[in-house]
Image (cartoon, helix red, strand yellow):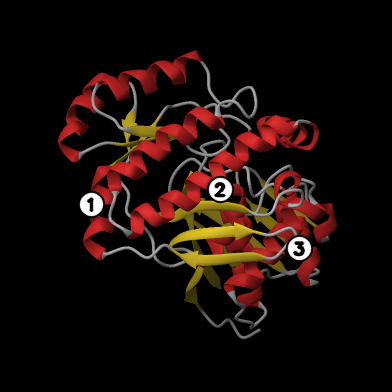
Amino acid sequence: MIISRTPLRMSFLGGGSDLPAYYRREQQGAVISTAINKYIYITVNEKFDSKVRASYSVTEIVERPHDLKHELIRESLSLLGIEGGIEITSISDIPSQGTGLGSSSTYTVGLLNALHAWRGCLVSAERLAEEACTIEIERCGKPIGKQDQYIAAYGGFQFIQFNPDESVYVDPVVMRYEDRQRLLQSLLMLYTGSTRSAANVLQEQQNNLENHAEQRALLAQMVRLAWQVRYALQQGDLNGFGEALHEGWQLKKQLAGGISNPRIDDWYDRARAAGAVGGKILGAGGGGFLLLYAPPEKHPAIRAALPGLRDIRFRFESQGSKIIYVEENGR
């Protein structure tokens, strides 16, 4: 039996510049993102017979991997040449669909890590991220970017660059320990209670980027903000981080319909009135988690202003996908 643990993530700035419709046409995309201590666990075990059993929200038992309806499992098994005799299950710390924490890519990276380990291989974070991109973007045709796969594989607090030649650079954001702790203490992550499919929003965003130069110009401003915030964090300028988060959210809302809505705008306005400097809806938008930056002494007033939203405590996670359990079973 093999168990992998892979972190979910929160993306602060530059989201959307990891879409090929942007970075293939512009000089470079860039995001600032961090892994958090909320995880997806994947269990892989040998099955008594030659069939494939995959258990997620439903359970599938099929003769061969190509019969699976779960496309991420099906394509992962195909990519690694695994024909059968395997059971796969998963558990997530928080809702894993439509919450804006990169769950699909986290699942794919964790699954690949567990499958490689089941075959007796230890592979690099770079390979896990590349293979996850191949499965989600190329094989499954999802209209998504690359940041989620890389942060899930690498972990940490990262500045990630996406280049026109398809290469990806992952560089840690260098901060003093005290500043990192102050940043963590200044962030609020509030669950809105609603989830949404990111596919439609991302597809519209990708179409807009392909067809409208003004949309690419907006995203170029968001990329510049990511570079500015990288420098601000290195200097310990946390208020600059919060202000950039606010500016980035105002730009992001213009990239596609469905990123925000009147209810989200009302929550955000109430949070700002109560002391938040900046914030955003995590992920593609439309629901999931509302992230806010505010001085810690303002947090009680913000929570009081948003009584219907659930406060989720978290920490930054320094490690990416890892194998946390191996039990030999005589294969």
Residue, disc 3: 165
Quarter the N terminus occupies: bottom right
Task: Kindly identify which numbered label has been placed on residue 103.
Answer: 2
- Dot 1 falls on a residue whose secondary structure is helix
Image point (41%, 50%), residue name: 229
The residue type indicated by label 3 comes to: Asp
Percent coordinates x, y for residue 105 in the rendering: 61, 53
SS category of the residue bearing label 3: loop
**Kind of residue at badge 2:** Ser
In this view, the mark in front (2 or 1): 1
Work out how far the residue at label 2 is from the one at label 1, CA to CA, in angstroms. Answer: 27 Å
Lateral position of residue 62 relative to residue 152, left or right: right
Q: Would you place residue 289 above or below residue 90 in this image?
A: above
Q: Nearer the viewer, residue 133 or 20?
A: 20
| Quadrant in the picture for residue 157 | bottom left
- The crowd level at tag 1 (other Cα within 10 Å; few <14, some 14-19, many 20+) is some
> Which mark is first along the chain, 3 or 1?
3
Compare marks 3 and 2 and give the one earlier in the sequence: 2
Q: CA distance from mark 1 to mark 3?
A: 37 Å
Residue lying at 65% horizontally and 27% vertically, measured from the top left: 256
Foreground residue among 150 and 81:
150
Residue at mark 1:
182
Mark 2 and mark 1 residues within 8 Å of each other at the beta carbon:
no
Please identify, in this view, whether the residue under mark 3 or under mark 2 is nearer the observer: 3
